[in-house]
Amino acid sequence: MPSAGGGAAGTSGKAGAAGDEVVAGAAGASAAGESGMGGEASGGEAGSIGAGGLAGEGGEGGEGGEGGGQAPAVLHSILRGSFAPLPGYTGQPLTGEALLYRTLDGSTQVSLQVLGLQAATLYPSHVHNQPCAVLAGAHYLIDPAAPAGESNEIWLSITTNADGIGVSQKSVQGHVARGDALSIVVHDPAAASAKMMCADLSVGSDGELRAHGTFAPFAVAEAADQAISGSVELLRSSAGSKVTLAVTGLDPAASYDCHIHALPCGVTSAGGHYKLDPSNTATLESNELWPDLGDTSDGAASGPTSFAHRARLDAQSVVIHRHASGMTPKVACADLTVDDYPDVALQGTSVRLPAASPDHTTLTATARLVRGLDGMTRVQLLASGLLPGVTYPAHVHNLPCAVQNGGGHYLIDKAAPAAEANELWLPLSASQQGTADARIAALHVATADARSIVIHDPNSQPASARLACIDLQ
């Protein structure tokens, strides 16, 4: 099972021909051509990594070969976000990245990297239950019915280095974080733990995300409602949200309402109504998602209701309420289970560094890093403007390009020594046209500090001067 800080098994392969995939941590990893990335792709001009996938997967970097079948998922979902300062701290250079992924065998892994803090300082950080736009609400509770406290929350402590940079990882076994794990907050230890900076956790795309559920009556519902059944679909898209119902077993003599709720059916009976603006706790149709049941006089309801709002991941269930003597008890519920979460992809285009002069003034490169639900991290790097026949060292680095020109090499296992087997290397073997295509696949989910890719000059004095850097964002 991949982990946020697992060591590399085995050593990575050496540089091959352009378009070959290098497999890092070879034990259990997919071999080149077996990971679904496809076969060889021509080097092409930099900038040819298509948005639909790595070259060889339908990107424009060349004609894809016959790829192997899709590897089975081992992760439930991957969420990420970027840190920004909260009110009271705006104007400070507070940045960073956050990553949360959930495994199919029942754990939650969180990692973060933060920059712009005070040196050598301990900062508290927690997963929160609301978006950054409403100051992130309160701490996320593993069991919302139990008291708040470290054992019932997801806490990450961060100790910064001499440059005010901190990294942290947390593994929570036996709990798959729900959809109301919406953000991560770093607090100010010098100001009564005020909220300093926040990162929203999301799938990182406004593409379609479908969720389905099956209605079942609550055990406490009266006998007339124990026959309720049916299905619901929630489609999130760039246009907003569409809820499609197909319900039977309603009491023809009763009237009902239907609402999206903020917790799963089995967690405090689905909690309260989902809010477009969670800071407004009033029950207002304009601030909530109320699917239209229509005429239920025949004991059934069906059809779609569309909303301009794209539901967050804390839209976790649909509840049917009965109108009874001025009360609206919950009588049936369906969990909204996302069908397929997407892989999470980052990409970027190079900036040339001073060492690129005078021999590499036309050097350009693009890169793409994909964290997959199969537990693999795949990276592709395309470059042009290289010297023909030269092999250039290139590596994933642990800082953005604007900070120390990318910092040091990214380490798979932070507690292990720096070495090829514990890093993500992409040697670029330039063709006679000065182009190169390097790929790597690692049995590892890259943590939040996989921030950039740096291309080095193998012939420089001193050795390995940095020619170009690519931010992954």
Image: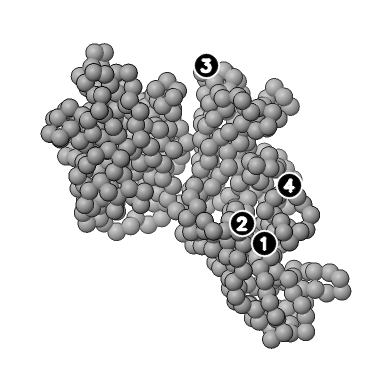
The answer to whether the residue labelled 1 contacts the one labelled 2, judged by CB atoms less than 8 Å apart, is yes
Q: Mark 2 points at which residue?
A: 309
Residue 279: which disc? 4
Is residue 70 rendered to the left or right of residue 305?
left
User: Closest to the observer: 179 or 151?
Assistant: 179
Determine the image quadrant of residue 242. Answer: bottom right
Percent position (x, y) of residue 431? 15, 35
Q: Which amino acid does the dot numbered 1 rest on?
A: Leu
Upstream in sequence: badge 2 or badge 4:
4
The answer to whether the residue labelled 4 contacts the one labelled 1, judged by CB atoms less than 8 Å apart, is no
When the figure is inspected, residue 309 is found, relative to residue 403, above or below; the finding is: below
Determine the image quadrant of residue 290. Answer: bottom right
When the figure is inspected, residue 167 is found, relative to residue 291, above or below; the finding is: above
Q: Which residue is drawn at 33% across and 25% down?
A: 352
Is residue 117 rendered to the left or right of residue 284?
left
Upstream in sequence: badge 1 or badge 2:
1
Percent position (x, y) of residue 386? 21, 29
Q: How far apart are marks 3 and 1 (CA)?
A: 48 Å
Q: Mark 1 points at which residue?
A: 289
Q: Is label 4 or label 3 in front? A: 4
